[in-house]
Structure formats: C-alpha cells, structure tokens
Amino acid sequence: MNVIAAAVTAVIALAIASKMATALPRRYRARNCQSSAWLQAFPDTRLQDVREFLLLCTQSFSFKGRQKLLFGPGDRLQEIYRSQHRRRRHDYRQQFDILESDLLARYGVELAPLWSEHLTLGDLFAQVKLHQGRRPV
C-alpha cells in the first residue's frame, strides 16, 4: 500500500512541476530546432553535451526542458530573461542566482566574472568547454 501511495505522490509532484514550468516566450517557441547552429558554432562538440548544458539553463529559467534546443548559441542571457519578464521590473543580476549555482555545481564555472549584458549562451558554453579541458571554437 505504501508503494502505491508513494507512486501516486510522485506522479502528482511531476504533474505539478510540469505545470509550474514557465511557457517559453513566443520569439523562441516560433523557431526551429537550433541543434545545427550549436554544432556549427562548436563542431568538435557532441550534441549530447549541448543538450545537457541547455537543459541546465532552461531549468534555471523555469522553462520546460524539452524546449531546450529552441535556444541558440547567439541568444543573450539577459534577453532570454527580459522576454520572460516583460511586464516586471527586476534586478536582472539577482535572477541569475539559480543559473549561477547550477553552473558552479555541474561544471565548476562561475557566472559572475563572465557577466555582461551581451553574454550569450554560446559564450557560456565556451567557458564550460574550457573548464572541462576542451578547446572551444
């Protein structure tokens, strides 16, 4: 009986978590898959590495993970945030705390020293690759 209750609880928790994920802004939803752009920008990279990196990023922004490949290497982090929070005024830097802690935990990469308004997902991925001992393109 306890196993059934635990399974039901897990299913409900997953359903709630998926509903809580933020809808991807239209400018990204309207795109085709960006995997070819990633592979062109980083030809020595496995697509699986890009997927894992983008999953971390999309989850940090509370987007659904299955939409991760709609983001391209040229997408600026601040623009992704702005497209998500158009009607709200926030301190952008505070909104990246989750991403920063996730990057540090997963890849050992600190976001703060890299930060600029123009920082792109591709720039960040290049730093991840550098930190992992791979040469970025």
Image (cartoon, rainbow, N blue to C red):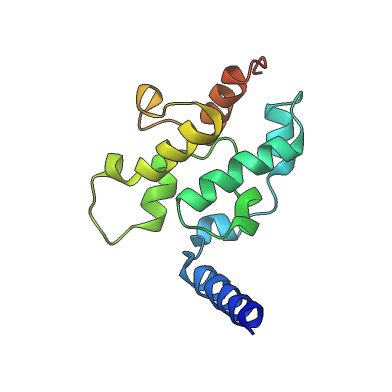
Q: Does residue 88 appear left or right of residue 40 in this picture?
A: left
Q: Where residue 44 sits: x, y (%)?
A: 76, 23
Q: Where residue 63 sits: x, y (%)?
A: 51, 58
Q: Does residue 135 appear left or right of residue 62 in this picture?
A: right
Place residue 130 in its image quadrant: top right
Q: Is residue 103 above or below residue 43?
A: below
Q: Nearer the viewer, residue 134 or 79?
A: 134
Give the residue at x 44% y 30%: 119
Q: Is residue 78 above or below residue 24?
A: above
Give the residue at x 54% y 22%: 127
Q: Is residue 17 above or below residue 43?
A: below
Q: Nearer the viewer, residue 35 or 46?
A: 46
Give the residue at x 40% y 45%: 98
Give the residue at x 67% y 43%: 51
State how many labels appear.
Answer: 0
Tell me if residue 52 can be seen.
yes
Q: Nearer the viewer, residue 35 or 98?
A: 98
Q: Where residue 50 sits: x, y (%)?
A: 67, 38
Residue reaching furthest to the front: 1
Quadrant housing the C terminus: top right
Q: Does residue 56 appear left or right of residue 80 in this picture?
A: right
